[in-house]
Image (cartoon, helix red, strand yellow):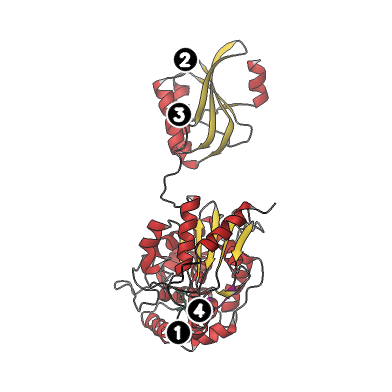
Amino acid sequence: MRSPILDYLDAIFEGTAHVTSGATADYIPDLAAADPDRAAVALCTVNGTVYASGDADHRFSIQSMSKPFAYALALEEHGVARVLEHVGVEPSGEAFNELSLDRETGRPLNPMINAGAIATHALVAQDEDDGVDRVLRFFSTLTGRDVEVDESVAASEMSTASRNLGLAYLLEATGGLARHPRAAVEGYVRQCAASVDVRDLALMAATLANGGVQPQTGEQVVCRETTRQVLSVMASCGMYDAAGDWFTAVGIPAKSGVAGGIIGVLPGQVGLAVFSPRLDAHGNSARGVAMMERMSDDMGLHLMEAGRPSRSALRERQSVTVDGEPATVYVLQGDIVLSSIEALTVELVENPPPTTLVVFDMSRVDEVRPVTWRVSAENATKLADDGHRIVVVDPDGTIEEFADARGRQVERWSPDRLRAALA
Ligand SMILES: NC(=O)CC[C@H](N)C(=O)O
């Protein structure tokens, strides 16, 4: 059976074929000469399966989509505090190649604009011999294959790199560049010329969606804190001066590149990648934006769309007899998050258990979020203070050893023990 997800991507591809507005990037000769009619779309879930439609094997240069990943590498190697000394996290509202630095700090505003990306590249590629290779090795870990530089694109961009060189010299003048300006731009341009297809990009995006774990190899490539930092900056700055338009319309962290690619990340679910070389006035792929908008609408990806409100943690309350003693069993369910534990707490306050013995059956609970611990401990403390004996049935070990605020251990029963007692 052909996957319906592939049929869906075909429909996205065909349904946006009429979007032929915009033009290929004109300031890099190799990109200006790209075939404007090529296009592709790919999707990779956090389970690691990649689906693609269109010119899915066509390779193009990663360009600015390299920036979030170079930033991730910088964060891993130097830590957030040191990286923040070199590059900020504020949206600039300006074009990607604007000659601007923060007036007060002298730093580039964020790592998604060129100034910040050159400073970031210089941080991760300080070693003259090995700099770009380290970045490429990192990309290769993310894609699961050897990523190489398209030398023709790199040479082409270096022939017209005055603006980026200007930025690098400006950075050097303010003391914010870890390498010689020319070497930093040469390395950055090679990083941008890394050659990828939409499948590679979907997998790279899915790694960010998956908390930094590459979904096919299971390798923790970057830590969760780095992933969160990178996605936050992509959400606020990834689409340059179209960031507000993008976030209201599509609503997921994203990054575009001047070769025509865009990646998007829905945390916890999916990485998306699209490609089409004609760019709009902001330097973002016009058909790519259309493809992303459709996918976001169809699949309900917008992060600000309030999801189904989480149900109460309480599935049902049973009055039973356990070993001849009356007991109240609370059957809990789903993910225990702040709103669902709050609903249980309201029930305990307004309708306190009438029996001494109180059992919380957690057999149907999937996950207990850390934020709910304190509330759970308080609930246990209050019940114990009121003379209740508390038992927890937690066969999947969703909670660890659990004592209330006065250090009283909560009793544990196996599901068999509960069943036997009820029989
Ligand atoms: N937006 C982009 O993709 C820009 C990247 C390109 N290498 C540049 O520096 O101009």
The vertical placement of 407 against 357, above or below, is: below
Mark sitting earlier along the chain (4/3): 4
Residue 121 forms part of the magenta stretch: no
**Outermost bottom residue:** 159
Q: Is residue 194 magenta?
A: yes
Q: Nearer the viewer, mark 2 or mark 4?
A: 4
Pointer 2 or 3: first along the chain: 3
- Name the residue tied to disc 1: 181
Q: Residue furthest left?
A: 104
Q: Amino acid at mark 1?
A: Pro
Comparing labels 2 and 3, the label whose residue is closer to the camera: 3
Residue range corresponding to the magenta coloring: 192-196
Of the two numbered discs 2 and 4 on the same chain, state the one appearing first in sequence.
4
Of the image marks 1 and 3, the number of the one nearer the N terminus:
1
Q: CA distance from mark 2 to mark 4?
A: 69 Å
Q: Quadrant of residue 235?
A: bottom left
Give the residue displayed 37% in from the left and 61% down from the top.
245
Residue 344: image tag: 3
Q: Secondary structure at mark 4?
A: helix
Task: Return the residue nearer the eye: 333 or 385.
Answer: 333
Q: Say few, some or many: other residues with alpha carbon within 10 Å of mark 1 (under 14 / 14 to 19 / 20 or more).
A: many
Q: Tell whether circle 4 marks a residue whose Cβ is less than 8 angstroms from ligand 1.
A: yes
Determine whether label 4 and label 3 are within 8 Å by CB.
no
Residue holding disc 4? 188
The x, y position of residue 369, in whole percent, is: 50, 41
Which residue position holds label 2? Answer: 354
Query: Measured from the top left, where is residue 285 in percent x and y?
Result: 46, 70
Q: Quick check: 61 above or below 373?
A: below
Inspect the image, locate mark 4, and give the three-letter code of the amino acid beneath it.
Answer: Tyr
Return the disc, 2 or 1, that comes first in the chain's sequence. Answer: 1
